[in-house]
């Protein structure tokens, strides 16, 4: 994985959430952002990292980078597309 | 206004949907829907709209809950027999969802009160059980420029259509005038399968939700019919020329509301 060289506008931790509330929480936060702003989402390995980035992509947003934090969590950088 | 954590959880299945999301849910929470009739159609519609988080729901009905209602009017309970239907419905909706403000109108909706009643709402659901009322709801909605969902059920059959001002025909464009009294039986006389209200009333709730959130295509310019015996739906395209309609046409001849005579019901008179 690439190093963290992306400046996020907003950070979100969904490691305490389970499916589907992981995506729901991410979606609630990203809807509040302006187009082009970047959200960094920390999530657990497994189901969250398999599903949340894909769901965000399905909603039209752009996944910029996924960093492995080496502690069983990942940080997904997503750019908001659309208003 | 941001959604609370409880709201995010309650409406999570809406929020997940690309077409609805937080924005659509907020539209629902800010919306005002009036349901005319807390009966077979109004019951499931009211339950689904309350569950969906429609912020203000008005419900109008003059009747009290009767034992013979309970076979299809699923918002009411045996314990509420004798209670005003609007109060019974309010209880059920508030129990489902405290986010919903329920306005009750325990009154017969007629030509003197309907325009004022519908004025403050964004969308109207016609859940009435007779032709005079259906024409009254239509004409009032045309005059007040309000979108509404028409529906009717009898025996194993149901139908619905949606009127949006300027976007297609109204109920009167299609059906002109109420049929002569006694030409068509009411559902009291003819019977109706309870689940018919569930099918058609839920479709009405869906029309309201789609209108509020701006998702997809409505039944404007179409009549959807359902035949439960054959288990068939038909979506019938309606004539698009509304110019000659007596109420929504270019030169309307109906400019005041009229109360057609209500068909008398033999069963009701025996009470």
Image (spheres, rainbow, N blue to C red):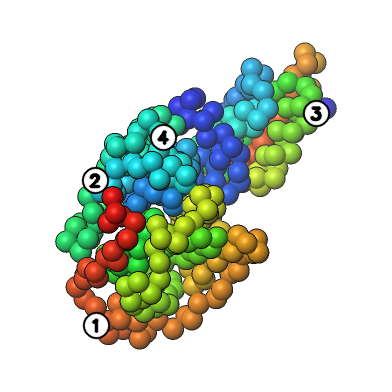
- Identify the residue position indicated by label 2 in the image: B106
- Identify the residue position indicated by label 1 in the image: B253
Query: Closer to the observer: label 3 or label 4?
Result: 4
Identity of the residue drawn at 24% across and 45% down: B106
Q: Quadrant of residue B135?
A: bottom left
| Callout 3 crowding tier (Cα within 10 Å): few <14, some 14–19, many ≥20 | few
| Callout 4 crowding tier (Cα within 10 Å): few <14, some 14–19, many ≥20 | some
In the rendered structure, find residue B77 and report the number of the disc placed on it. 4
Callout 2: SS: loop
| Callout 2 crowding tier (Cα within 10 Å): few <14, some 14–19, many ≥20 | some
In the rendered structure, find residue A19 and report the number of the disc placed on it. none
Callout 4: SS: loop
Callout 1: SS: loop
Q: Please check whether the numbered discs 2 and 4 fall on a single chain.
A: yes
Q: Please check whether the numbered discs 3 and 4 fall on a single chain.
A: no
Whole-angstrom CA distance, mark 3 to mark 4, is 61 Å
Position of B241 with respect to A36 (left or right) is left
Residue situated furthest left in the rendering:
B112
How far across and down, in percent of the image, does residue B148 sit? 39, 61
Identity of the residue drawn at 35% across and 67% down: B131
Earlier in the chain: of badge 2 and badge 1, it is: 2
Which chain letter matches label 1? Answer: B
How far across and down, in percent of the image, does residue B31 sit? 38, 46
- Identify the residue position indicated by label 3 in the image: A2
Which chain letter matches label 4? Answer: B
Tell which of B181 and B146 is nearer to you.
B181
């Amino acid at each position: 994985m690439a190093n963290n060289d992306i400046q996020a506008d907003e950070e979100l931790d969904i490691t305490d959430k389970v499916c589907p509330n992981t995506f729901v929480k991410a979606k609630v936060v990203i809807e509040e952002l302006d187009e082009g702003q970047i959200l960094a989402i920390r999530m657990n390995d497994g189901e969250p990292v398999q599903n949340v980035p894909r769901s965000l992509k399905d909603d039209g947003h752009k996944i910029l980078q996924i960093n492995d934090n080496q502690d069983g969590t990942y940080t997904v950088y997503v750019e908001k597309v659309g208003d | 206004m941001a959604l609370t954590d409880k709201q995010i959880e309650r409406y999570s299945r809406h929020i997940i949907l690309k077409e609805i999301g937080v924005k659509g849910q907020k539209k629902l929470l800010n919306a005002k829907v009036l349901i005319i009739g807390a009966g077979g159609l109004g019951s499931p519609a009211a339950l689904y709209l309350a569950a969906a988080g429609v912020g203000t729901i008005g419900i109008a009905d003059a009747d009290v809950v009767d034992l013979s209602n309970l076979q299809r009017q699923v918002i009411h309970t045996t314990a509420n027999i004798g209670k005003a239907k609007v109060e019974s419905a309010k209880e059920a909706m508030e129990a489902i969802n405290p986010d919903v403000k329920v306005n009750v109108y325990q009154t017969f909706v007629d030509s003197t009160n309907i325009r004022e009643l519908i004025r403050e709402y964004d969308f109207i659901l016609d859940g009435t059980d007779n032709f005079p009322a259906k024409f009254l709801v239509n004409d009032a909605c045309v005059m007040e420029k309000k979108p509404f969902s028409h529906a009717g059920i009898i025996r194993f059959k149901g139908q619905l259509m949606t009127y949006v001002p300027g976007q297609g025909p109204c109920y009167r464009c299609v059906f002109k005038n109420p049929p002569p009294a006694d030409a068509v039986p009411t559902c009291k006389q003819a019977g109706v399968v309870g689940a018919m209200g569930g099918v058609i009333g839920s479709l009405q709730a869906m029309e309201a939700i789609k209108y509020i959130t701006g998702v997809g295509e409505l039944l404007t310019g179409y009549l959807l019919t359902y035949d439960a015996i054959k288990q068939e739906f038909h979506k019938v395209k309606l004539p698009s020329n509304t110019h000659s309609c007596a109420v929504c046409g270019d030169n309307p001849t109906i400019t005041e509301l009229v109360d057609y005579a209500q068909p008398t019901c033999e069963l009701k008179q025996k009470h």
